[in-house]
Image (cartoon, helix red, strand yellow):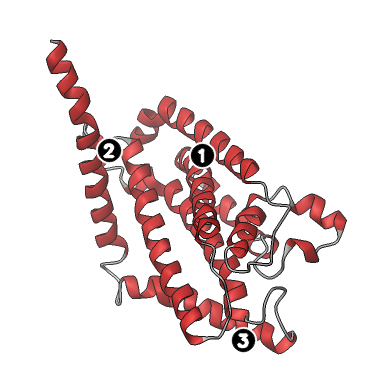
């Protein structure tokens, strides 16, 4: 009996990994396989948005807050923001998207969360590599890359997106109106998360308020990775991870307690 139980324990991670990969392949086919261009749009959309933002602001200002290159400055804010934004929304819809498959005993809500998390992180990481690589190849930015900071920012945005996305998964499934409410509540984040400015440009009164926006810290670390002279002393990695951990724990506890009822509704 002990041998059989040990074999089951060893087989569980393998079974889970196969389920997650299968869910990822299903989402790739449904999300990108049905649209013309597929994954091309995943790169074209942020590239076009950055080009438009850079064009508009270059006509209003002589230089961005850091460096001299508008596309690089805005990319260091826009791309980590979009990673968080996509994760928090797509993970929030994980149960509804995979609801037919969750009827099978071998597929759990955790598998659905992990599949959406892994696929979107990998997609955004590839998009970031292509967009940043394109900017550095086309323009003379004189950027000195610090990969630990870039990867740390990517990890912070991913953790925050997973945590808030898991909480959203319960709220969006239990209360369908929350999805629209969340979209409305997060629209100001595009303005107040440091995409168009740096923390140091804000008056002290504004700094005291915006410090509590975790995305300001994520963007600050990303910019530290491209601008060697920018120290971003206000950044607190601990604060971001605490927010991510609290929301993830709360979301998973609510889902564990109510996931059967949510799938029946």
Q: Which residue is mark 3?
A: 55
Q: Secondary structure at mark 1?
A: helix
Tell me, yes or no, whether the two marked residues, 3 and 2, touch with CB atoms within 8 Å. Answer: no
Residue 53 seen anywhere in this rendered image of the structure? no
Location of the C terminus (image quadrant): top left
Mark closest to the chain's N terminus, 2 or 1: 2
Callout 2: SS: helix
The answer to whether residue 204 is above or below residue 53 is above
Q: Which residue is mark 1?
A: 167
For label 1, the crowd category at 10 Å Cα-Cα, with few meaning under 14, some 14 to 19 and many 20 or more, is many
Q: Position of residue 146 (x, y in %)?
A: 54, 63
Determine whether, in the image, residue 239 is placed left or right of residue 14: right
The answer to whether residue 245 is above or below residue 178 is above
**Residue displayed at 12% across by 17% down:** 4
The residue lying at 53 percent from left, 31 percent from top is 250
Between label 2 and label 1, give the one nearer the viewer.
1
Asked which quadrant contains residue 230, the reply is: bottom right
- The residue nearer to you, when weighing 131 against 41, is 131
Query: Which residue, given by chain and number where applicable, does mark 2 sit on?
Result: 102
Q: Nearer the viewer, mark 1 or mark 3?
A: 3
Give the x, y percent position of residue 92: 45, 47
3 or 2: tag closer to the N-terminus:
3
- Residue 194: x and y in percent read 68, 63
Task: Tell whether 65 sits left or right of 140.
Answer: right
What residue appears at the point 54 percent right and 50 percent down from the top-left corner?
Answer: 156
């Amino acid at each position: 009996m002990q041998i059989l139980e040990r074999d089951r324990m060893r087989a569980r991670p393998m079974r889970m990994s196969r389920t997650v990969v299968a869910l990822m392949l299903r989402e790739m086919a449904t999300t990108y396989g049905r649209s013309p261009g597929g994954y091309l749009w995943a790169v074209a959309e942020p590239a076009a948005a950055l080009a438009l933002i850079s064009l508009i602001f270059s006509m209003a200002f002589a230089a961005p807050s850091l460096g001299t290159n508008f596309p690089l400055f805005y990319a260091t804010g826009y791309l980590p923001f979009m990673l968080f934004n996509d994760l928090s929304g797509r993970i929030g819809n994980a149960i509804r998207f995979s609801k037919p498959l969750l009827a099978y005993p071998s597929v759990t809500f955790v598998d659905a969360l992990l599949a959406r998390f892994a696929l979107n992180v990998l997609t955004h990481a590839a998009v970031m590599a292509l967009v940043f690589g394109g900017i550095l190849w086309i323009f003379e930015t004189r950027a000195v890359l610090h990969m630990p900071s870039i990867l740390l920012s990517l990890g912070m945005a991913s953790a925050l997106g997973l945590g808030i996305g898991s909480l959203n998964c319960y709220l969006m499934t239990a209360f369908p109106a929350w999805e629209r409410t969340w979209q409305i509540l997060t629209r100001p984040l595009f303005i107040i998360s440091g995409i168009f400015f740096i923390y140091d440009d804000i008056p002290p009164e504004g700094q005291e308020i915006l410090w509590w926006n975790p995305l300001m810290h994520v963007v600050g670390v990303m910019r530290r990775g491209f601008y060697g002279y920018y120290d971003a002393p206000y950044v607190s990695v601990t604060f971001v991870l605490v927010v991510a951990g609290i929301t993830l724990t709360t979301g998973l506890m609510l889902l564990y307690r109510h996931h059967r009822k949510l799938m029946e509704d």
